[in-house]
Amino acid sequence: PCVNLSWASLDKTREEYQAKVDADEKLLAEVISRLLRNKKILAQAEARARKKTLCLASEMAAEGEDVNAEVPNCPAASV
């Protein structure tokens, strides 16, 4: 005998696992879509933060403040 299983058993297994693969592919597509959206939003937020930093530095420089002055114990200094 080639295989010690019935055709019905083989068909049931194929159908069962095809359904699982289909569900996993759908979930993966949703996760990839969410990941790409979140990465885009994060990149936009980082760009806005850089722009705000430059704007604040420009305002400080216009007011005569030393933009490059180091602030002791500043947690943002290590970023």
Image: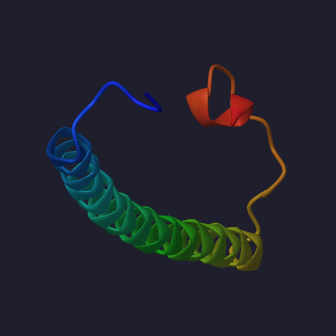
Residue that lies at the very extreme toward the front in this rendered image: 1
Quarter of the image for residue 77 reads top right
Q: Nearer the viewer, residue 11 or 27?
A: 11
Which residue sits at x=63%, y=66%?
Answer: 53
How many numbered tags mark residues here?
Answer: 0
| Residue at x 22%, y 51% (from the top left corner) | 11
Instruction: Name the residue: 70% across, 68% down.
Output: 57
Residue 40 to residue 13: above or below: below
Front residue (pair 47, 64): 47
- Measured as percent of width and height from the top left, residue 47 is found at 61, 74
Its colouring scheme is rainbow
Look at the image and tell me in which quarter the C terminus lies.
Answer: top right
Residue 5 vs residue 71: left or right?
left
Name the quadrant of the N terminus: top left
Which of the pair 39/29 is nearer the observer? 29
User: Observer-nearest residue: 40 or 56?
Assistant: 40
On screen, residue 14 versus residue 77, left or right, reads left
Q: Position of residue 20 (x, y in %)?
A: 24, 49
On the image, the x and y values in percent for residue 74 come to 61, 28
User: Looking at the rendering, which quadrant does residue 32 occupy?
Assistant: bottom left
Residue at far top of view: 73
Looking at the image, is 22 positioned above or below residue 62? above
